[in-house]
Image (cartoon, grey):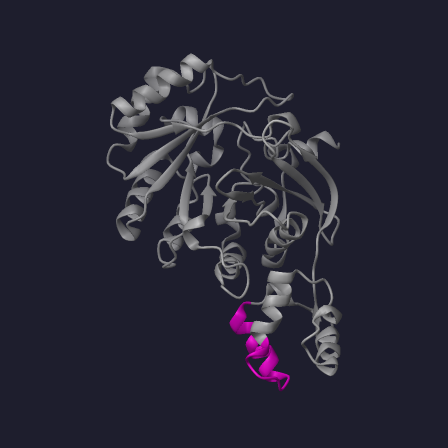
Amino acid sequence: MDKIDIKALSKTELENELIALGYEPYRTGQIFRWLYKVGVRSFDEMSDIPLDMRNRLKAKFHITHLVILDSRSSASDGTIKYLFKLEDSNTIETVFLPERDRNTVCLSSQVGCKYGCSFCASAPFGFIRNLRSSELLDEIIFLKLKNPLASITNLVFMGIGEPLDNYDNVMRAIRIFNDEEAFNIGARKITISTCGIIPGIEKLKKEGLQIELSVSLHASTDAVRSKLVPINKRYPLKDLMAACKDYVESTNRIITFEYILIKGVNSSGEDAVQLARLLKDIKCKVNTITCNHIASKDYKKPSDEDVRIFIKKLKSNGINAMNRRSKGEDIDAGCGQLRISRL
């Protein structure tokens, strides 16, 4: 019989497994601390667990871990991008973004992606599979061990994949990220970014967790958005905006709309005014970012002046907006770029 992936178990599931083996429930907290606070790769390292119990755990459970294939560090802002190999030899990327007042990790949620956004470097790989919750947790465990002096404060599911398309595994991981005996990362410090999967947004609003929701919008009309984000053909703007408004009203949380600025496509002053009209009834903020250069794409960045005008137009029309500085450009930190560079 195959061994159980222990990090794929919730705390309650692990406790039930231990009780079934005849152990006290408090052992669950001990094992959680070893797995997530210490980051052990072997039951032999769990020194306060009796030897006979460690042997029984080894016989029944398996501890996953990632293998690093490559990493690149930005000379300009300290961003570090990692390329990992999973146990089935598939690869994923994770990005560490250190700042003065916080340290953020950008997580991948799938191997590849189904949704084919035209500006995304991971799109050419297509979709292979969902990441298991244990693999999501392993992304953070590795970075904790690699950067022991830099406490991880924020998590963003903005890497490769669509997190709401891997809903159950993402939520299972988030509950462990939030657990004080594991990572103890506050729910408000965790952001899920979606390209607009309405059923996932509707499920998320019922979770009762104060996590942040970010929607990759990138256009103010269906014609443009369908070219940039093809899932818009299934979930057009009218339906997506209704779902977002309902989410805000149900959770009393602000939604962040992400908007990648592409010269000649969606970055004019007129585009900004149209975007403000689209969002006027939704409690939200807008984060713009200029597009990364990808050799296989012909998209170009707008000028700094065009970005300034775009933001000014949004603000003058009542929308809270800011332009985010793109990090790690010198190390191909955009989604999928490190994988592409190794092909």
Residue 85 x/y as whole percent: 73, 47
Magenta stretch: give its range. 10-27
Residue toward you, 98 or 221: 98
| Nearer-the-camera pick, 66 or 103 | 103
Q: Find the residue positioned furthest to the bottom.
A: 22
119 or 285: nearer the viewer? 285
Residue 127 image position (x, y, % from top left): 62, 42
Q: Taking 324 as reference, is 15 left or right?
A: right
Does residue 270 appear anywhere in the picture?
yes
Corner quadrant of residue 327: top right
Q: Is residue 108 left or right of residue 234?
A: right
Instruction: Using the rendered view, name the quadrant where residue 241 is placed.
Output: top left
- Magenta span has 109? no
**Which residue is painted at 25% across and 28% down in the image?**
318
- Seen at 51% across and 17% down, the residue is 301
Residue 324 vs 241, above or below: the answer is above
Task: Decide: is 37 above or below 156.
Answer: below
Quadrant housing the N terminus: bottom right
The C terminus: image quadrant:
top right
> Which percent across, then down, holds residue 180?
49, 64
Image x and y of residue 52, in percent:
74, 83
Work out whether residue 14 can be spotted. no
The reply, left or right, for residue 103 in relation to residue 127 is left
20 inside magenta stretch: yes
| Residue at x 40% of width, y 53% of height | 204
Point 52% across, 54% down: residue: 170
